[in-house]
Amino acid sequence: MDSAVVEGGTLDNIFGLGLSAREINAKDARFRRAFLESADFRLAHLEGSYFEDAVLFRANFKDASLDKAVLDGVNAAHSIFDGAKMTTVSAESADFSEASLRKADFAVADLKNTRFLGADVTGASFKDADLTGAQFAGAIGLDTCDFTGSMGYKAPTASTRATATTTTTATPTTTHFFLP
């Protein structure tokens, strides 16, 4: 399916375990409730596509274009979205836990109640995104993200980063051993 054109196609409920869809043109396509675990969508054109409630576990969307896509309720845990263009995407209640989202662009995205637990968000942009209820516990690279104009999430500041990295020095103690 590499480089295929399914623009506007309906692929609801498709079972695509390990599917190779690299560089596919699937603009405005429907993948509702699709099972796409470990699928390869690198460099894919998925603008306006609909992935509601899809399983995208361990899928690869590196450098894919997902602008205006609907990812509400997807399971994208452990997936790769490095460099993906996801502006104005709707991903309410999606799960990006442990995913790699390095330099992903979520500008103006609807990310309400989305989980980024343990995700690598280094260099990602959440500019003007709605992050109400989003969870970032254990996320890597939060201090490198652009949260300009975003709402619903308090981005780490220099003072909170300093507090989080403060170390204490242990006081040495003397231990006495008695030998018979």
Image (tube, rainbow, N blue to C red):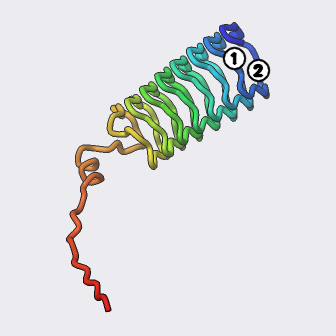
Task: Give the residue displayed 45% in from the left and 45% down from the top.
Answer: 136
Give the crowd class for mark 1: few <14, some 14-19, many >=20 residues within 10 Å: many
Residue type, label 1: Ala
Above/below status of 24 relative to 139:
above
Q: Position of residue 174 (x, y in %)?
A: 22, 78
Visible residue check, residue 163: yes
Spatial CA span between label 1 and label 2: 7 Å
Residue type, label 2: Leu
- The part of the image, by quadrant, that contains residue 72 is top right
Q: Which mark identifies residue 64?
A: none
- The part of the image, by quadrant, that contains residue 141 is top left
Residue 169 shown left or right of residue 10 in the figure: left
Q: Position of residue 77 (x, y in %)?
A: 59, 38
- How many numbered badges does the structure rendering display? 2
Residue picked out by circle 1: 29
Residue contact between numbered discs 1 and 2, judged by CB atoms under 8 Å: yes
Task: Give the residue displayed 69% in from the left and 7% down from the top.
Answer: 5
Please, which residue is most extreme toward the bottom here?
180
> Can you say which quadrant of the picture contains the N terminus?
top right
Task: Give the residue displayed 35% in from the left and 42% down from the top.
Answer: 155
Above/below status of 120 relative to 15:
below
- The part of the image, by quadrant, that contains residue 178 is bottom left
Residue picked out by circle 2: 11
